[in-house]
Amino acid sequence: MQRETAEPTVQQLPGPTAEKWVDLHHQAAATSTYVYDFVWDITEDAEGPFCTDADGNVLLDFTSHVAAAPLGYNNPKIMDDLREFDLVDPMKIAGQDFYVSTGGTPDEAELPGPTHLMNKLTEITAKYDMDTVFLSNSGAEAVENAMKICYDHCEQPKYGLTFEGAFHGRTLGALSLNRSKSVYRRDFPELSGIHDVPHSMEGVERLREKLDPDNGHIPPEQVAFMILEPVQGEGGYRVPDAEFMRAVNDLCSEHDIPIIADEIQSGVGRTGEMWASDHFDFEPDVITSAKALRVGATISRSDIFPDERARISSTWGAGDILASIQGSLTLAAIEEHDLLSHAEKQGTAFLDRLASLQEDHEEVIEDVRGLGLMTAVEFDTKDRREAVMEAALERGLLTLGCGKKALRLLPPLDVRDRELDIAVDLLDEAVEDAS
Ligand SMILES: Cc1ncc(COP(=O)(O)O)c(C=O)c1O
């Protein structure tokens, strides 16, 4: 497969081999999260946003594995260096108990491991004075640890603040912060003291009243954190306006409330800046990252992190050697190939094209929006969104839903004009079909 010439080609989806994989998979797998019967064959050709499924269908993947494959498939910017790495066993070590060297002294090491990754993360968050990192295995763990360090840092921790539409993960602590769909939270036990407000200026005003030292009912000194996604992901790719972000920032600084920016979906270049927070007049105290980084990361200042040994820890925390190398190489590739400007430029071009698509289908497309390459198309109904996703998939374009009736599009950060054109053409046909 050549990225320059690859085209989506679908014979049948799901094809007979995919159906066998799906059947076998569901003999043991929990069923709750599989969205469509697409079976990526890791042994077949895949390059950039193009991949091959179990029946030889070629797809244009505009999901980037929910932002977790930011450079697409088999990108030489990652693979060329990774080929230097001979697999070892164990590949994961007890990362917060042992240290790992990737060869020679840290200066001469040919590959960047967990130690290098943590140092790099402090470099790219230096503008927020962040100098300390705790690595973990997933986004939810990054959020759990962000909350833990904030609770620990607060003298009388009783409350946490979140926004309507938020999604922060599925573990018992993190799910308490979710306000997108009821399925994530319904009937599960939750952390106490979590308050939510609308994701709007009205919400900030309401928060101001709640925190008012004279008339409010939440003493600000008992608020351990305020958490938000700088661009809401699962809740619908909602890009906030600058005024809202400034107001949230100002209110939290007024009351000395630490801000956790959940950058798990929006970070690592997705929006055309390293962190979506960088677009705004907004200064987080803690950043959570995962997905594109391949490992979970809670990043903050040393004064917020607890000193006490074992207060936060995890067997595989900083010990996933391969994932840390992939994360480090991803950050290096973003820098070396100026992928932030590229994502910004291509994101603007993509949004323009999606805006024309909206004009052509104004009876069914209600909105197109996004920041950088974190883009979404909002339809008139949920059924329409589902029908468009299905029609797109039949044509070889892989997309994802978000919010109630939006479809998200996440091309790789180095997406090319030709790939954007193909995606818009296929989407156009899919919308036509679903109208
Ligand atoms: C903003 C945000 N926070 C947290 C998470 C949870 O990450 P993980 O699924 O790796 O636990 C996600 C996952 O979609 C996310 O989008």
Image (spheres, rainbow, N blue to C red):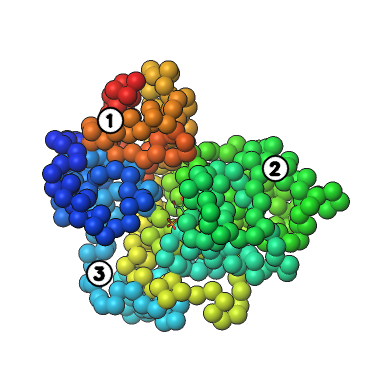
Name the secondary structure under disc 3.
loop
**Label 3 vs label 1, nearer the camera:** 1
User: Of 388 and 284, which appears nearest the observer?
Assistant: 388
For disc 3, the neighbor class at 10 Å (few under 14, some 14 to 19, many from 20) is: some
Q: Which residue is mark 2?
A: 204
Please tell me which residue is depicted at 55% across the width and 68% down the height of the picture: 132
Q: Quadrant of residue 194?
A: bottom right
> What residue type is disc 1 on?
Ala
SS type, badge 2: helix
Horizontal side of residue 382 vs 72, given as left or right: right
On the image, the x and y values in percent for residue 366 come to: 47, 24
Judge depth for marks 2 and 1 and give the one in front.
1
Residue appearing at x 26%, y 50% in the figure: 73
Q: Which residue in the protein does label 1 denote?
A: 391
Which of the two residues, 37 or 138, is positioned nearer the viewer here? Answer: 37
- Say whether disc 2 or disc 1 marks the residue closer to the N-terminus: 2
For disc 1, the neighbor class at 10 Å (few under 14, some 14 to 19, many from 20) is many
Question: Which structural element holds mark 1?
Answer: helix
- Name the residue beneath numbered marker 3: 85
In the rendered image, is residue 31 in sight?
Answer: yes
Disc 2 from disc 1: Cα separation: 40 Å
Q: In which quadrant of the rendered view does residue 421 lie?
A: top left
347 relative to 151 in the view: left or right: left
Q: Are marks 2 and 1 in contact (CB under 8 Å)?
A: no
Q: Amino acid at mark 2?
A: Val
